[in-house]
Amino acid sequence: MKKIYRLKDFPIDEKALMLQETLFHNANGYLGVRGNLEEGLPQEFNTMRGTYLNGFYDVIPMKQSESLCNLVEEKDTMLNVADFQSIEIFFDGERFSMLDGRAEQLCRTLDMDAGITERSLAWHTNSGKHIQICFRRMASFVRKNMFTIECRLKCLDADCGLDIHSHQKALVRNYSNPADPRVGQNNKLLLHPTVHLLENGTSVLECETTVSSLKVCTAVQHELSRKMRESISYDEIEHSCTASYSGSLKKGEELRLVKYIAVCDSRREAEPVKAALSYLGESFGELDELYEEQAEYLESFWERSLLHIETDDDSGLAMVFNQYQLLQSVGSDGICGTASKGLSGEGYEGHYFWDTEIYILPFLSCTNPELARCQLGYRYATLELARENAKLLGHKKGVLFPWRTVSGRECSGFFPAGSAQYHINGDIAYAVVQYYLMTGDFEYMAKEGAEILIETARLWMDVGNYSKGKFVINDVTGPDEYTCIVNNNYYTNASAKYNLTWAVKAARLLSDRGMWQELEARLGVSSEELEGFGKAAEAMLLPYDEALGINPQDDSFLSKPIWDFENTPKENYPLLLHYHPLCLYRHQVCKQADTVLAYFLFDGIESRETMLSSFEYYEKLTTHDSSLSNCVFSIVAARLGLKDKARSYFGDSIRSDLVNSYGNTGDGIHTANMGGSYMTIVYGFAGMTVTESGIGFAPSIPDDWRSYSFRIGYMGRSLEISVNTEKASVRLLSGEALDIRLFGQLVRLNDKTEVSI
């Protein structure tokens, strides 16, 4: 299967270009560059021109209207760090622009086998010259600091004069859209020049942030296929460099210009300038080698993770696109996480949410456990800040991870739908456990995981209390942000129960191997405290309504009037942009899966009858205004045997960015939904469950599919699951023999054997 997404003869307008900038961005988990036009656009085009580094941020004010105790009044924001994309080209003095002359055969390509994007066109100048133009870009997965732009030019019908001006600008601003709260509102200049160097055709620019005092450096050098007159200059006011090349282009001759860019920052490098020059020196002139490395890296990635769907629609390509975007988004150094928009745009200011642990970590744990551990390592690295956050909110013990952050500090200004989402603790604890169950990585559990489980469990003991013999958790917000500050949110209580239970199990695991004593002493854990965790888990209140036979979302949810969906205009969705939060809070209306999500994560927590009744109840109340929702409803529908509904929700989820179904993909991709679409097949249609007793599958297949298959890693083994309309089979590709459950039956997998049912 060729993994290529191609867009031809597209419109040249602001909305279309914003979407293309996202879909054709290049990233490698560290560095992300939006797919902007190299030649630029007039100022009246309000597009998002951006370059981002994962985990690189500055701190800006977030003034509260009332300065109440310990409300957050400043926040991290991911910065647009440089513009090194710009390449101006003049043919006989006429500047190339897709808005001038005549552009034909427009084509943009994302090649997910090669790891490159390409933009090509035929351009007719106003004077009648016919030019072929092609730009090819790559963010190296192997050399994370390197970005390349290859430009090929050919004049087909006559000789012509040629002038090229390649720019590097360091003083850039962030995008701002006052009409959309999901995008940052700050576009002040937060970078200040510190260093510039021009030597031997190389330009180096370094800047420092205003508050966080982080430094970022870009080093640029060009390679031409033949000699031209050249010069390089520096503009002190703009802190920018321009490399200029002048000459001619003969009829039928192709000129190739390669722009090599190295990017470094002070969070990873002690001397960013020195490091950038070193990386540039190692890669300059090696474009073919860089392309080869990229293809080899992706060949290995797809070998481990490819999920193949055989159907008449484009679901297979959409899934490949989603998996590739996840790879582009995920940090791999333990310093950073995964932003909700990846490195494709500035939506949500580059913040990390619970999305990573619940929607993205499952994909990584199945296909790339090393990356999964890096993501969990980021949370462990910010544990001390989570302790401070818990204290700020009045808790005496434990940690409370921030709802949204880059540095590890809370960056949520609106606490009802932010800091009050205590389930973030349960989400991270859940990810720790699931990673352990998938990999058996006891070393991780001993070094980091158990401490996270203990400290998050302590927070539940402090925020919750006993009432009438039940352990209750009051005044928190669950995943549904249309229902805030409630008592006993079902999802929150279920995640707390799981967290508390596994804190005790982790202590026993370490104790059984003689490794508990050090952590016990360091954290001051007593046997009485562990016993308290177990009792609270056992007594946890999980709301249930006898009359309806469902789990209420919280104690007060069913007492509210149902939202008037029939008379809500379609243009008023998403509701959060058109109705005051209090108006939403006072109704039965859900932004996204909440109780239904608990049914997926905590398999077997309720009877099938209760889950089915609850699913049908919440289905009528859920707007899916969040991109995190459709995939969850699809997974649970598949597990409940509701095949048509599962297929319908999956169709809404899998291609949401490709068709811009939420209308804001121009601000960046929806990484969590992409992870969710993967989970829909693996955990939904294939029915995968992973518990202490092992791994199991109960596959189904949508009626309009012929087959699907995927590979996962489990406990050091490689498994291949294949499902068609006649049978489901599991094959052990590598590793020791293994017992699995297939439709509830225990079967033995031996080396390279296939078990079918």
Image (spheres, rainbow, N blue to C red):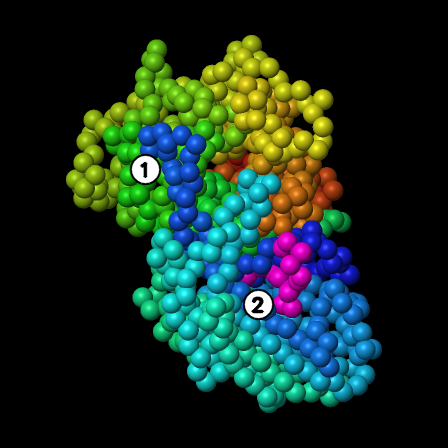
Instruction: Give me the C-alpha separation between circle 1 and circle 2.
Output: 39 Å
Q: Is residue 131 magenta?
A: no
Above or below residue 381? Residue 8 is: below
- Picture quarter containing residue 39? bottom right
How packed mark 1 is, by other alpha carbons closer than 10 Å (few <14, some 14-19, many 20 or more), is many
Checking the image for residue 389, the label placed there is 1
Direction front: furthest residue: 237
Of 545 and 412, which appears nearest the observer? Answer: 412
Of 97 and 626, which appears nearest the observer? Answer: 97
Q: Residue at x 33, y 33 (%)?
A: 70
- Picture quarter containing residue 584? top right
Q: Look at the image and tell me whether residue 236 can be seen.
A: yes
Q: Quadrant of the C terminus?
A: top right
Q: Secondary structure at mark 1?
A: helix
* Residue 320 picture location, percent across and down: 62, 54
Q: Residue at x 39, y 58 (%)?
A: 209
Report the number of numbered marks.
Answer: 2
Mark 1 against mark 2, which lies toward the viewer?
A: 2
Q: Is residue 32 magenta?
A: yes
Q: Quadrant of the N terminus?
A: bottom right
How packed mark 2 is, by other alpha carbons closer than 10 Å (few <14, some 14-19, many 20 or more), is many
User: What secondary structure is the stretch in magenta mostly built from?
Assistant: loop
**Where does label 2 land, which residue?**
85
* Residue 61 picture location, percent across and down: 41, 44
Give the residues in magenta. Answer: 31-47
Q: Earlier in the sequence, mark 1 or mark 2?
A: 2
Q: Look at the image and tell me whether residue 752 can be seen.
A: no
Above or below residue 556? Residue 529 is: below
Dot 1 amino acid type: Asn
Above or below residue 135? Residue 302 is: above
